Amino acid sequence: MKIALAQLNYHIGNFSSNTAKIIAAIEKAKTQQAEIIVFSELAIGGYPAKDLLHNASFLYHCQEAITKIANACHDILCIIGAPIPNTDPEGKKLYNAAVCLENGKVTHMSKKGLLPTYDVFDEYRYFEPNRNFECFTYKNTKIALTVCEDLWDDDEGNNSYVGDPMIELRQENPDLLINIAASPFSYTHFQNRVAVLQSHVTKAKCPLIYVNQVGAHMDIIFDGRSLAFDQNGNICCELKKFEEDFQVVEYSNHTILSDAVPIIVADQEIALIHDALLLGLRDYFYKSGFKKAVLGLSGGLDSALVAALACEALGSENVLAILLPSIYSSDHSIQDALDLVKNTKCKHQIIPIKDVAQAFESTLAPLFEGLQADITEENIQARTRSTLLMAISNKLGYIVLNTSNKSEAAVGYGTLYGDMAGSISVIGDVYKSKAYELARYINRNGEIIPVNTIEKAPSAELRPDQKDSDSLPPYDLLDQVLFQYIEKEQSKEQIVALGFDETLVQRIVKLVNNAEFKRFQAPPILRVSPKAFGSGRSMPLVAFYA
């Protein structure tokens, strides 16, 4: 029996496009004599649809799409994820289900039982958990069909579910496991994903088909990398990462056979981050209907990174770099910015901010009389730049890209309504030390980001001879502590026990906690780590942190 794995990039709420794409994949599967085609979790409607799942019109279109797709499913079984009404008056109104479509109708449904609420997930807000699990038979093959988390009971300890759907399903001795998923990307996730899936193959003693979503939806990025395992847990088919893909495998004699060559080379972490950011940026613009991006280009590492990524994702002809030198901007920074423009071939303009910033200071002079210059004047420069960038955005239709990195966002080293402004934060989940690695990776085939930009000491250049190290610990040390506190969720005491200086840890943790109000107002961040600021890390805005 041939089984098609259809890994597609869906657009939330775009039913005409999504349905056409799904039906096209079904027709392709038929031409290759596939008897089953498998799509990802909540493919119908898109994931995560969030509060659209409370919208009656959205749900009507979901049911309408199911009908259209079912009518295309003759001589083939389609397994696809969809929100399904709960007909029981008790409980929530929807199930998250894997729906089987054949010969114009729904022939089976497997409803999701384990509804994650950790990190970026909030499924219990919308769905009723299923409590009864059973296999179904198709062409003499007993199939255990599950939805994402129902196969993740032995993940990283994130969950504390009472039940385990796979225990019930294994008791029926299935011949084949199929799991449909919408498993978000992080640069640490894939190997763990493989280990979890392999463990279920071992326990069930049968092969497994896993189809994951691909694409980006604002902050959340899906890497695809759908998989097929034989009965021994060996990967016999791996679909592409960060791209749509389609493969057909053969299920025969309780195993999986495939002509596809499995990918066995471990990916560089930095290469994964690079590719994920490109997909996140590209999909954010395409799915929002935007085409052109603008950013402030300072000559520093972060803005250079964002400019290079934007040019690669959107095309350099769609990127406008604005150089906004102040009286403190060094000649080498301006030259570095111009060198990057030359290397990327993006458009650019130079708009000195000296007169504008001085106009603000002159206007405020009567109120500030007798007071020493301080961070106020530095922030005026940052906000001047933001005002100019937003004016260009309004007038010319360019979307402003935020260029702050995760280290800065963590400790509040940024100006509200200044350098923290923007529609999307491109590298807000990339620590500064990782940003250097990313810059070198971008330069792997030749200089894109000027070498001087990478090698010089980082500076905001908002006062004479300013360096980031004036206010912050060295980034390689700072980022280690931040990783333990944010990604690992370790306490101060636990971090100190790892060998870090207690005074340093206390200082860094205080900076992170005190900056929560800034991050609350920051743009959405493309998520590439296990714990990003935004929907995956919910902290009280007004609280006392010990």
Image: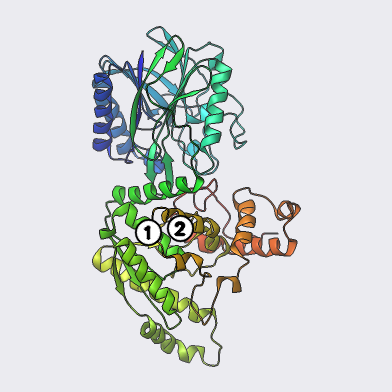
Residue 69, located in which quarter of the rendered image?
top left
Q: Is residue 423 visible?
A: no
Q: Residues within 10 Å of mark 2 (few under 14, many from 20)?
A: many
Please, is residue 466 above or below residue 243 in the view? below
Q: Residues within 10 Å of mark 1 (few under 14, many from 20)?
A: many
Residue 163, located in which quarter of the rendered image?
top right
User: Residue most toward the top?
Assistant: 140
Q: Is residue 10 visible?
A: yes
| Contact check, label 2 and label 1, Cβ < 8 Å | yes
Residue 504, located in which quarter of the rendered image?
bottom right
Is disc 1 placed on a helix, strand or loop? Answer: helix
| Disc number for residue 190 | none
Of the pair 380 and 202, the residue shown nearer to us? 202
- The mark that comes first in sequence, 2 or 1, is 1
Q: Which residue is mark 1?
A: 308
Q: CA distance from mark 2 to mark 1?
A: 9 Å
Which quarter of the rendered picture does the N terminus lie within?
top left
* Amino acid at dot 1: Ala
Locate residue 457, reporting x and y percent: 53, 70
Please, is residue 135 above or below residue 264 in the view? above
Locate residue 532, reporting x and y percent: 52, 51
Is disc 2 placed on a helix, strand or loop? Answer: helix
Please, is residue 177 above or below residue 335 in the view? above
Of the pair 208 and 301, the residue shown nearer to us? 301
| Horizontal side, residue 509 vs residue 53: left or right | right
Please, is residue 222 above or below residue 299 in the view? above
Locate residue 388, reporting x and y percent: 34, 73
| Disc number for residue 439 | 2
Of the pair 10 and 270, the residue shown nearer to us? 270
Locate residue 449, reporting x and y percent: 41, 62
The residue at the point 55 percent across, 50 percent down is 537
* Amino acid at dot 2: Ala
